[in-house]
Image: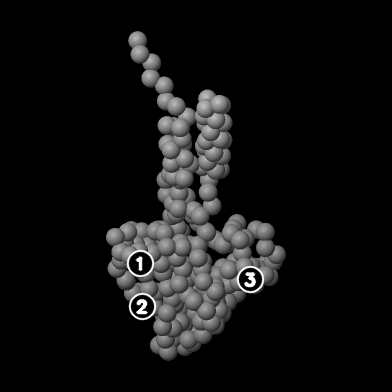
């Protein structure tokens, strides 16, 4: 019987390839309600999302979004607010993601706010990764009394679009009683992200890389011993 054995130098390319390939996992749901996600933030905090590491959901929020926590959830739920300046596009650093549901409301009592919610689908064949652009013209009715239970406008249309590249908020219009973006609130994002696309290497991959490098060193030492 003939026994076939693979030398370390033959196995090394396969070990290194396995090290650099991410361990694929199923797309996982992520719920951003900011009550549980921001448990480490003090009450009544107002923080720019770009200063947080990691950012909520691991998304790229741009510099226009701020998180707000309070001690009175009935009056002002923990949520996200738009700043007066900055970028209002949210993406997954160029990777596809799913947005199944999102809630919008106006921050303070009285008045309405009108804006465009622009969604771009993901297209792997496109150099930019952007496919189709869909624009939702939305109007959020302001509550008559902020002390009442919060009323949100929930958008679920994006669940049927498949993977997204990004979503943007634009054209805050004069059709409502206010065009002040600082009064705009987003909450309760239901996302699905692929952990294999995360920028941080998984421990298993890093361990495999170390093992491959160690095997390479052992093979070189053995070759040097034989040549002597």
Rendered position, 192 above or below 2: below
Cα–Cα gap, marks 1 and 2: 25 Å
* First reached walking from the N terminus: tag 3 or tag 2: 3
Q: Which mark is residue 128?
A: 1
The residue singled out by tag 3 in the image is 47
Q: Nearer the viewer, residue 140 or 203?
A: 203
Q: Closer to us: mark 3 or mark 1?
A: 1
Q: Residue 150, image x and y in percent?
A: 54, 70
Q: Residues within 10 Å of mark 1 (few under 14, many from 20)?
A: few
The residue singled out by tag 2 in the image is 137
Q: Residue 49, image x and y in percent?
A: 58, 68
Q: Nearer the viewer, residue 49 or 67?
A: 49
Q: Quarter of the image holding residue 98?
A: bottom left
In the image, what residue occupies the spot 45% across and 72% down?
89
Q: For numbered disc 3, what is the local secondary structure?
A: strand
* First reached walking from the N terminus: tag 3 or tag 1: 3
């Amino acid at each position: 019987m003939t026994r076939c054995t693979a030398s370390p130098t033959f196995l090394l390319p396969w070990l290194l390839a396995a090290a650099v390939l991410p361990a694929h996992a199923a797309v996982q749901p992520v719920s951003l309600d900011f009550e549980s996600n921001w448990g480490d933030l003090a009450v009544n905090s107002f923080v720019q999302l770009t200063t947080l590491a990691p950012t909520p959901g691991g998304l790229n929020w741009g510099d226009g979004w701020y998180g707000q926590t309070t001690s009175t959830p009935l009056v002002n739920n923990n949520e996200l607010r738009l700043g007066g300046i900055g970028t209002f596009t949210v993406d997954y650093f160029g990777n596809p993601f799913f947005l199944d549901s999102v809630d919008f409301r106006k921050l303070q009592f009285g008045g309405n706010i009108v804006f465009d919610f622009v969604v771009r689908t993901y297209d792997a064949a496109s150099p930019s990764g952007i496919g189709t652009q869909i624009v939702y013209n939305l109007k959020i009715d302001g509550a008559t009394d902020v002390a009442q239970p919060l009323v949100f406008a929930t958008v679920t249309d994006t669940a049927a679009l498949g993977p997204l590249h990004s979503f943007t908020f634009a054209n805050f219009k004069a059709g409502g009683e206010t065009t002040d973006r600082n009064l705009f609130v987003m909450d309760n994002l239901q996302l699905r992200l692929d952990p294999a696309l995360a920028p941080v290497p998984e421990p298993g991959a890093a361990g495999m890389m170390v093992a491959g490098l160690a095997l390479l060193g052992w093979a070189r030492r053995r070759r040097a011993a034989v040549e002597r």
